[in-house]
Image (cartoon, helix red, strand yellow):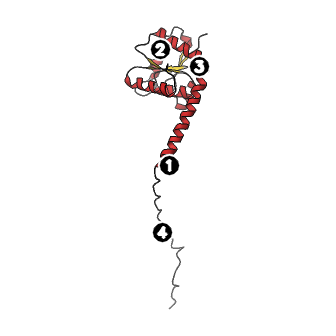
Amino acid sequence: GILPVVGIPMHFAGTDEREHLELLSSRAANRGEFVALKNVLTAPEAKALLGGAQLAFGISYHSAVFSLSSGVPYLGLYRGAHYEQKMLGLADLFDVPSLPVPIDDTPPAVFERRLLDLLEARDRLGPRLQQRAAQIAAEVGASRARVLAAVPQAPQAALPSPLPSPLRMERSNPPSTN
């Protein structure tokens, strides 16, 4: 059967992806199978949605990271050197050579085949992606600890002693009684 496609916007300021997703939805052959979200999502909400998917694709680095770190196979569409570098980097980091997809050089039938191949591979790929995400998190934590250990701790500035309260002042000489 056909899996529904849910368009999850990742950018709202400047270029609002909701407009592009609506345009894609209007052009889909099976319109009922393409749902474009209109809500502004927080990062945890977007990650939760992507984490529940069978597979994901998109142009956003954030959606790629959210998907891959949740164990969801991802195809990263890109145009231009900046996004090519990002998608190639994620492909290398997660050991998924099929991840980067150049928009201008990939005919729709080839993209569809890649999606179907990814869907077939998801059961064996998903756990490997989750394991790699856990490894990355551990490596980042260990790296952070090494950096913090190598940076000398700044001496704590001595707090100024509070001014003595007149009520707590001890008198060294008793008052004279002349």
Residue 149 - label: 1
- Indicate the quadrant where residue 123 lies: top right
The answer, for residue 52, to whether it is visible in the render is no
Relative to 28, is 163 above or below? below
Residue 62: assigned label:
none
First of labels 4, 2 by sequence position: 2
Work out whether residue 142 or residue 75 is closer to the camera in this orientation and state it.
Answer: 142
Q: Point out residue 32 in the picture as x, y percentages from the top left corner.
A: 56, 12
Earlier sequence position, callout 2 versus callout 1: 2
For label 2, the residue is: 24
- The earlier-in-sequence mark between 1 and 4 is 1
4 and 3 marks in contact (CB < 8 Å): no
* Residue with the mark numbered 3: 122
What amino acid type should be assigned to the residue bearing mark 2? Answer: Leu
Q: Secondary structure at mark 1?
A: helix
How many other residues sit within 10 Å of disc 1, few (<14), some (14-19) or many (≥20)? few
Q: Label 4 vs label 2: CA separation?
A: 70 Å
Q: Residue at x 46, y 15 (%)?
A: 23
Q: Residues within 10 Å of mark 4 (few under 14, many from 20)?
A: few
Residue that label 4 marks: 163
Which picture quadrant has residue 167?
bottom right
Q: Secondary structure at mark 3?
A: helix
Q: CA distance from mark 2 to mark 3?
A: 25 Å
Instruction: Kindly identify the residue that appears in the image at 55 percent across and 14 percent down.
Output: 117
Q: Earlier in the sequence, mark 4 or mark 3?
A: 3
> Gap between marks 1 and 4, in whole Å?
37 Å
Tell me which amino acid carries mark 4. Leu
65 lies above or below 108: below
Q: Are marks 2 and 3 in contact (CB under 8 Å)?
A: no
Q: Nearer the viewer, mark 2 or mark 1?
A: 1
